Image: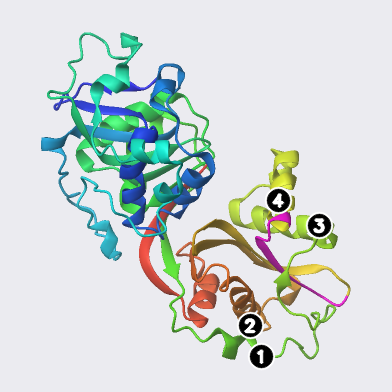
Amino acid sequence: MFSLFQRSISDTLIRPLTTDDWGQLDAMIAQDPVAFLYAAEHLDHFGLPAPSALASRSGHGFMGIFVPAEKSRPVANPGLEPSPAPARNLDLGYTLGAASSSIAERLPATARRAAQKFLSPLSQINEGDQSHAPATEPAPPGGQLKLVGAFWLGSNLVPLVVPEQFRAAVATAITRSHRSLASIFGYADDVLPLWELIAGKLPLPLSVRENQPLMVLPDSANLAAVGRASLYREGLQAPQLSEDGARWARTSDRRSLLKASVAMFTEEVGYDPLSRDPAGYTRRVDEFVRTGRTVVATNTEGVVVFKADLGLAFGERCQIQGVWLHPAYRGRGLSTPLLAQAFELIKPRFPQISLYVNDFNTRARKLYESIGMEQIGTFATVVF
């Protein structure tokens, strides 16, 4: 269940977010929509539970950090390099009035009214089940709470904003949840300090990737000029690429695409995804084809030799994941025109394209820079 944490400031509350908090969470996401695309997509897909569901809801999904309104301004994170993304200088204490594409605006009227309750009374949190607020832990004075941070806790842990003075409380909530995590990812200045606090209480990770440039494609990028380059390569020791170039994946690509996806995942993460969850991974590949979220290029024998996925997508934004080129075609200058063609296909649906990449993957970074992508921040990922 959600918990009240008694610390040096005993009136901090960490609990699952509900429809009463929709407006505040939506406003938080709107302040940094590129970095918080995972949260935007998940909020759109999963929504938030009603306040009445808190009595039976365990600590997972969207979790919020609350303090009384008069104590809602967090301090800066000393000793950490600030992100180059201006949106990281957030004035927490979120107000309504997000962009016109706000998720909350699409809610039914009753849910929208609930989301517009800018401050959530504590009495609603514990209504009907006082067992979640131990008598030894005092309730916040005045009853008016404001959201100062949030994180997603599921198979992945994704911090949105975790102010420094609340990290210990968040770390306690995470370890008490006993969630089995596949990864932790997000802004490095949130992920890495949290990881330091919980590392000894979780299984050993496969890798900790501390520096992952978050990149975006600016409107000025000239994809057409790059994408028009010929895909024919003299002396290629493999079938030439199809003249179709990059295109949306089809059901007929399924078998070849699955092999390509497994090869990409194994190369990137370090293990074969079919060894852990073959049915789940296969479903994900099929779902991406069905919903138009995978771009491929094949050779003249119909084998998928290039792929890129829309790993996240919401509104006008998407985040590209799973970019891969078959080893037999590498080093021949094919990645740049293929990726440019892929982005040209994607932009009419999602004009704002982003991705993040490992800093040590110099080849990939040069590829993204070659089509005009620019770094706006730094992510970090812990992979289990």
Q: Residue at x 43, y 77 (%)?
A: 218
Q: Residue at x 30, y 43 (%)?
A: 24
Lower position in the chain sequence, tag 4 or tag 1:
1
Q: Amino acid at mark 3?
A: Arg
- Please tell me how many numbered marks the rendered image carries: 4
Q: Quadrant of residue 169?
A: top left
Q: CA distance from mark 3 to mark 2?
A: 23 Å
Q: CA distance from mark 1 to mark 3?
A: 27 Å
Residue bearing mark 1: 229
Instruction: Give residue 332's position: percent from left, percent from top.
Output: 68, 83
Pointer 1 with pointer 3, Cβ within 8 A = no
Report the side of 275 relative to 353 (left or right). Answer: right
SS category of the residue bearing label 4:
helix
Residue bearing mark 2: 337
The residue sitting at the front extreme is 109
Q: Amino acid at mark 2?
A: Pro
Q: Quadrant of residue 341?
A: bottom right
Q: CA distance from mark 2 to mark 4?
A: 26 Å
Q: Quadrant of residue 290?
A: bottom right
Residue bearing mark 4: 287
Binning the other alpha carbons within 10 Å of mark 3 as few (below 14), some (14 to 19) or many (20 upward) gives some
Q: Is residue 315 magenta?
A: no
Pointer 2 with pointer 1, Cβ within 8 A = yes
Q: Residue at x 50, y 50 (%)?
A: 41
Q: CA distance from mark 2 to mark 1?
A: 6 Å
Instruction: Give residue 246's position: percent from left, percent from top.
Output: 71, 75
Q: CA distance from mark 4 to mark 1?
A: 31 Å
Which numbered dot is residue 254? 3
